[in-house]
């Protein structure tokens, strides 16, 4: 495991690996922020956010932002 990749400390080690930026994006995607606002908050371009989104859609086998949010809640990464 590299320093830029991590399973989630204290969580199920069977969860897909993602870097800290992807995890931060996932947490922000579970809010009411738009993707442009997420990009601004993360200090990256909207195209970079698009890349995080598409990578997570593929890795987590979801097709929408709602799917990402449901996955994050079920995995215990986001608490409502």
Image: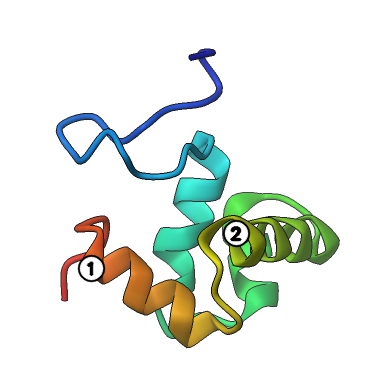
Mark 2 — residue?
56
Disc 2/disc 1 C-alpha distance (Å): 15 Å
Residue 7 placement: quadrant:
top left
**Residue in the picture at 42% in, 27% down:** 6
In the image, 43: left or right of 14? right
User: x, y percentage for residue 56?
Assistant: 60, 59
Residue 54 is labelled as none
In the image, 50: left or right of 79? right
Q: Nearer the viewer, residue 15 or 26?
A: 15
**Residue in the picture at 16% in, 76% down:** 80
Mark 1 — residue?
74
User: x, y percentage for residue 59?
Assistant: 59, 55
Residue 54 versus residue 77 in the image, above or below? below
Say whether residue 21 is visible: yes
In the image, 39: left or right of 72? right
Q: Nearer the viewer, residue 64 or 42?
A: 64
Q: Secondary structure at mark 1?
A: helix
């Amino acid at each position: 495991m590299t320093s830029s990749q991590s399973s989630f400390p204290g969580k199920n080690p069977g969860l897909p690996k993602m870097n800290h930026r992807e995890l931060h994006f996932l947490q922000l995607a579970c809010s009411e922020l738009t993707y442009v606002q997420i990009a601004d908050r993360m200090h990256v371009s909207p195209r970079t956010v698009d890349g995080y989104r598409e990578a997570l859609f593929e890795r987590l086998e979801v097709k929408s932002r709602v799917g990402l949010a449901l996955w994050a809640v079920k995995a215990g990464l986001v608490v409502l």
